[in-house]
Amino acid sequence: MTRLQSLISGAVLSLAVFSVQAVELAISAEDAYAKTQQTQERVLLVDVRDPVEIMFVGFTDAVDVNIPFLMADRSKWNAERNIFPMERNPEFVAQIKAELAKRGWDENTEVITMCRSGSERGEPSAIVLREAGLPNARFVVNGFQGGAESEGPQAGMRVKNGWQNSGLPWSSKLNGEKIYRTDR
């Protein structure tokens, strides 16, 4: 095999491995819920949204715990975008590992993160967890609310896919034992 053939073969193999990892990283809301309902394998389902967002959008008690990946910094204001900036929770990885330890589970436990849509916090949080030594971290593709319609009378509304739109259990009520709180 020539050097060029060897390089090409290595590149193709790398792409194949990357593709498998990308598929492994994502899990559907239905499959994540099914995992929370079985008892054979340990699974930690983590809602990674800011608790104020959860308060207005809804929550599922199938989640084990809420540990925000990004939180709104209410001490700053972005006037250009008319929003509070979202900043990374510096204790995120440590808090996830503490939840695993509290249950007597190791870092090989499957950890599934879920945000609103799966893209801005769900997938990045799973990648950060994998980089921090949790090889079985995953994220719920399409998140809690799902994707927004691009056309028609419901354009801009999150009414397709995701946890809420899959017929899975959720409520507008929060569970004070599971929600991220700074008062305890």
Image (spheres, rainbow, N blue to C red):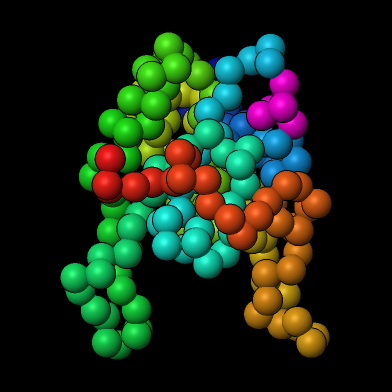
Residue at 41% in and 57% down: 50
Quarter assignment of residue 21: top right
Horizontal side of residue 149 vs 182, given as left or right: right
Residue 35 in the magenta stretch? The answer is yes
Quadrant placement of the N terminus: top right
Residues rendered magenta in the picture: 34-38
Q: Is residue 108 left or right of residue 69?
A: right
Task: Give whichever of 178, 11 is nearer the camera.
Answer: 178
Q: Is the magenta stretch mostly helix, strand or loop?
A: helix
Taking the spot 25% from the left edge, 69% from the top edge, the residue there is 74
Height in image: 17 above or below 27?
Answer: above
Residue depicted at 74% across the width and 68% down the height: 159
Percent x, y for residue 54? 50, 58
Report if residue 25 lies within the magenta region.
no
Q: Can residue 31 be seen in this view?
A: yes
Image coordinates for residue 72, horizontal then vertical, percent: 32, 64
Instruction: Please state which of residues 51 and 31 is positioned toward the viewer in this rendering.
Output: 51
Callout count:
0
Residue lying at 38% horizontally and 19% vertically, measured from the top left = 102
Give how far across and how far down residue 84 sits, in percent: 31, 74
